[in-house]
Image (tube, helix red, strand yellow):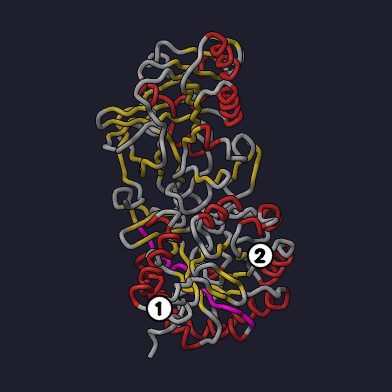
Amino acid sequence: MIEQPIMVRIFDITKESPGVKTLFFKSKLNFEPGQFIMVWIPLLDEKPFTISYFQEELAGISVLKKGLFTNALHNMKKGDKLGIRGPYGRGFSIPKTLNSCVVGGGIGMASLATLTERLGNVTIVQGTKTASEIIYRERFKNMNICTEDGSIGFKGTTVDLFAELLKKQSFQRVYACGPEKMMYRIFELCNSRYIECEVSLDRYIKCGFGVCGQCDCSGQRICIDGPVFPSNELSNMKDFGKTLILKNGKRAYC
Amino acid sequence: MPKIDLSINLCNIKLANPTILASGILGTTKALLKRVVENGVGAVTIKSVSTEPREGHKNPTVITFEGGMLNAVGYSNPGVDAAAIEFASIEDVGAPVIASVIGTQKEDFVQVINRLSKSKFSAIEIPLSCPHTPGFGMLAEQGTPQATFDITSAVRKVTKLPLFVKISPNIPEICTVAKAAEDAGADAITAVNSMGPGMVINIEAQKPVLSFKVGGVTGDALRPIAIRCVYDIYKAVKIPIIGVGGISTGRHAIEMIMAGASAIGIGTGIYYRGIDVFKKVCEEMTQWMQENGFYSINSIVGIAHD
């Protein structure tokens, strides 16, 4: 495979929340839930995004307006062109019949969206700071919603709500994506109850195909060994939940 | 039948086999170096370290094409203070570790080497030949015979470790540069760095793909050039050569050693064959040696010469 961007035209744009837009484009990607693509805006930059919608020949990325690059994506119009390459990495494992739960914190829900559709009957937890930030409310009608300010749903974090759910029921597998501290606590909760857990990690990515070493997490390359890691591997990754590597190679706390 | 021995002695460093992780590939953390060692490498090189932290170029920084890879990472690194912490107790890695050191002037090289001196690196490599980072290598004219001599001499004064000088394939007088490094006290020549720079334009976007527009070319396209460079340098200097450029199979490695290399670097080979490329190359070399009656690496070095 030649690792170079292919230009696609934006086919449609939908607004998921005041800060999140989904950009749709036609493409025949060989995508599995949990994988990511690199999105290129010529002369600006290139960043990793998960595919949050995947239908026949139509894929979408849900973009939280956060910095220069995501701002530029938000300013794009139908018909504008984007470069994409990938998909890259190892996605979520999808067993046939398991009682599972997905836990999405903030825009982390985007990484779990196609997985949620694939799993079908699954418990969904989505948490944000406030009501207006909740995404995919029409798409997933039976979500367990929580907000830190209590403006909708349970008042508290996804970790609090997940711990509440565990009082009433158990799961065979839990999938989480969100801030790393959150994922670490979900992983710990699962470990204490012998529940298998898979999380999708986020690091600064450059090449996307495992040669540059930028996205290291304890010897694992997020781009090719991950981004999804199961509990047994996470247990050996000392950096998980603690430190990450910035663009310049410096370590920082998660 | 005698046992096939891939081990080598490179400037008094013992390597279990002649494969070396080339600089700039996976050398960002101690954990990744360890992982490469678990995959059968003989020695590893850290990602180049400068005095100050550097963000490098914006993405895209690494892409591939039909003939190999194109990169303009731009020497992103955390700077020597953070690197000294990351690579403290580097002996844990389990194989010799080479420190790649960069600078915009010779004083920078000296400063970085002094700051790293508490870590147990096995050798120092100075790449004077990067084709895509302003202030460094070819873009700062560090690759001329005179500059190579000056920087190598300055570094030689402050370290007793084996010193490797990495040179560019892009200059006609490559042997003069290698000779200048040898005369200044280098213990080995690493040949070669990436070539070019080259450019890939996306014709739909009508723009170059790399953010820096140009980048160093590595992989298959580089191999015949690297082989020729090593062949020429072998005749020009007495010190050993670490042959780098497009090696991803045992046959490539044997070819490079026949041209005159005592050890071989692998970088882009990880893209072609995965992180266990080192194990694969060693297995293939062993098999070829078995079939062709060679029992040591030394007996192959330079045999393509008249």
| Label located before the other in sequence (1 or 2) | 2
From what the image shows, is residue B49 above or below residue B254? above
**Residue occupying the point 73% across, 74% down:** B158
Q: Which of the pair A16/B20 is nearer the observer? A: B20
Q: Is B129 placed above or below A58 here?
A: below
Q: Amino acid at mark 1?
A: Phe
Q: Residues within 10 Å of mark 2 (few under 14, many from 20)?
A: many
Instruction: Determine which residue is flagged by label 2.
Output: B121
* Residue B217 visible in the picture: no
Q: Quadrant of the N terminus of chain B?
A: bottom left
Which element type, helix, strand or loop, lies under badge 1?
Answer: loop
Residue B94 visible to an observer of this rendering? yes
Depth order, front residue of B45/B279: B279
Q: Is residue A25 above or below residue B66?
A: above
Residue shown at the point (31%, 51%) measured from the top left: A1
Percent x, y of residue B169: 45, 75
Q: Do the dots labelled 1 and 2 sit on one chain?
A: yes
Which residue is tagged 1?
B294
Q: Which mark is residue A27?
A: none
Q: Quick one: A36 or B171, which is closer to the camera?
A: A36
Query: What residue lies at 48% left-to-right and 39% top-to-bottom?
Result: A69
- Judged by depth in the image, the label closer to the viewer, 1 or 2, is 1
Q: Chain letter for mark 1, please.
A: B
Residue at the extreme front of the image, as rendered: B1
Magenta stretch, residue numbers: B185-200
Q: Quadrant of residue B3?
A: bottom left
- Cβ atoms at labels 1 and 2 below 8 Å apart: no
